[in-house]
Image (tube, helix red, strand yellow):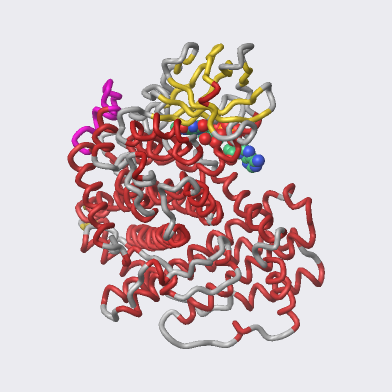
Amino acid sequence: MTTTMSSIPAVIKGGSFLIETRKPEEVFTPEDLTDQHRLIAQTAEEFVQREIIPRLKEIEEKKPGLLRELLKKAGELGLLATDIAQKYGGLELDKISSIIISEKMARDGAWASTIGAQAGIGILPIAFFGTEAQKQKYVPRLARGEWVGAYCLSEASSASDALHCKTKATLSPDGKHYILNGAKMWITNGGIADIYIVFARIDGEKFTAFIVERNFPGVSPGAEEHKMGIQGSSTTPLNLQDAPVPVENVLGEIGKGHQIAFNILNMGRLKLGAGCIGGCKVLIVPTLQWAKERQAFGRPIADFGMIKEKLGTMVARIYAAESMSYRSAGMIDRLLEGVDQGAPEAALQILEALQEYAVECSILKVAGTEALDYVADEAVQIFGGYGFSADYEVERTYRDQRVNRIFEGTNEINRLLIVDMLLKRSMKGELALIPAAQRVLDEVLGPTSLDEEEDGILAAETRLVEGAKRVALLVAGAAVQKYLQALSEEQEVIGGLSNVIIEVYSMESALLRAQKKLSREAGEIARLHCEAARCYIHEAADRVEMEARRVLPRVAEGDALRSCMALLRRFLKRSPVDTIELKRHLADRALELGRHPFA
Ligand SMILES: Cc1cc2nc3c(=O)[nH]c(=O)nc-3n(C[C@H](O)[C@H](O)[C@H](O)COP(=O)(O)OP(=O)(O)OC[C@H]3O[C@@H](n4cnc5c(N)ncnc54)[C@H](O)[C@@H]3O)c2cc1C
């Protein structure tokens, strides 16, 4: 089976994975990478090996000028410009290329956040929302890394609810400038930037974005924050004291700054999720090596079942997260196929594509950051006391990765968004979730298609994925029925539902990837794909069941609850699978290769 972009249907609606069944050939997988993608991966990898790894210590110690120098070198190779139109000095590459670069840059957390901020939230607001003059003036120099960009949304008293910012803009009496006053906080690249995208309220009301140059009067970055991790990156406040910003530097429409703030974050979430998966693949390498070399009780610790269990879990989680990352980027690319990126309407089309898959981007952000959280935590555990020592890199990675669950929208905010966006689409009639949920509730009266057992490789897992989708619809339907508009006050229910939805997307992405591999070849590698998918899906089914059991008694009672619980059992009916054996095998293969086996 060969997959080109055109095998992916153009009309896959964002969030439709809950109510539709996809075929393996309809998703992009890491096995579908083209020669051009591999070349980009090689360029990015060589850059990291040549420029970043030898300078990790200097980065960590914040050697003056180093980050700017590295950004410039990355810019010369085009690593900052994948998402930018050629007309403005960009490469106009697809989103698969963007996530490949994010994965590779994840070799070091501080560097990943520096380049991530530059190539994403630093440049894209102007590239997507700027006027022609703003694009011509700023984008090429930012894309080449000659100028550094930063994005200033958060403040000391508001970040998750950034629309309530206190920074104010007032039009000067001669109408030529907006005078900005306020203080932004937590600004990545704040200390080294030339250009700041600042969000402020005009007259304390209209939330608007501005392009602020560092050398404008009254603009001054504050001192570097002392952080738990990514210490080599620059994070500062930005103080604005009667700072005059020319009116032509208003970015986008007055009062519509939220469109910039939130749309740009969709891209950030896609890339951060992918970057974290890259981080997992980097970190598993020294962990495997250590497990092989470290002896305890006269044997390498890799021989111990509890260590193998951790390694096998890492492999399965990375497999699932990677599958959904490429699937998501592939859908965005498919939607953008044929778009002339130099055309004036291109920015809008790109933003619409990202908005279409905003649910998937949020899912990827949560799943990717939490996969890395797991891998980093267990890597420290496998290193034992040495993992707690600053002499070993896992200690730093453990600290560095922690911030990923906090920025680009905390994972709590993203969990809320996933459900909120899906329900809003459903209310608007864009996604038929409520009728699907109703059909699921009706299944209590009759047989369900899932009652029939099917034989074959991955048949049980296919059934479980379908069952998990129905569980998501069951919980969503019961929750909406009970709480209607008041559901937003039931955050524990939303969180549980979100967890089920995240698992559904992960499970299905892993399944489709394994099925696709299997359809192409039947050898040992394909079997390993199937093992990773089986392992992930069966454990995820347990988690889905647990979440549903926790939430359903909150959203149904009496006979209705009993019906829901009966449906839950039917939807997730499964024969036990020996995941211990599966994980041993996945771990053994990773130990043999010294890396994630699907890299
Ligand atoms: C190293 C670093 C770099 C950063 N870089 C940038 C940058 O470049 N530009 C920028 O603008 N910002 C940046 N940030 C800020 C970051 O985006 C915010 O820290 C983040 O959005 C969380 O906001 P907060 O810190 O105000 O926490 P709060 O919003 O106060 O949240 C605290 C806790 O409450 C939870 N919470 C908040 N609201 C809700 C709710 N409605 N329901 C349930 N739980 C909720 C949160 O999930 C979190 O667990 C950076 C932060 C760090 C640490």
Residue closest to the far right: 558
Picture layout, residue 67 above or below residue 592 = above
The quarter of the picture where residue 509 lies is: bottom left
Q: Measuring 41% from the left and 49% from the top, which residue is drawn there?
A: 341
Where's ligand 1: which quadrant? top right
Residue 178 rendering spot, x and y as whole percentages: 58, 18
Dominant SS in magenta? helix
- The magenta stretch is 53-68
Residue 402 rendering spot, x and y as whole percentages: 44, 40
Q: Measuring 61% from the left and 76% from the top, which residue is drawn there?
A: 571
The quarter of the picture where residue 127 lies is: top left
Residue 87 rendering spot, x and y as whole percentages: 36, 42
Left-right relation of 31 to 442: left
Q: Which of 227 and 117 is in front in this view?
A: 117
In the rendered structure, does residue 448 fall within the stretch colored magenta?
Answer: no
Q: Is residue 390 visible?
A: yes
Q: Measuring 43% from the left and 53% from the top, which residue is drawn there?
A: 371
Left-right relation of 350 to 524: right
Left-right relation of 314 to 521: right
Numbered marks: total: 0
Q: Nearer the viewer, residue 339 or 5?
A: 339
Q: In which quarter of the image is the N terminus?
A: bottom left
Picture layout, residue 61 above or below residue 279 = above
Picture layout, residue 126 above or below residue 538 = above
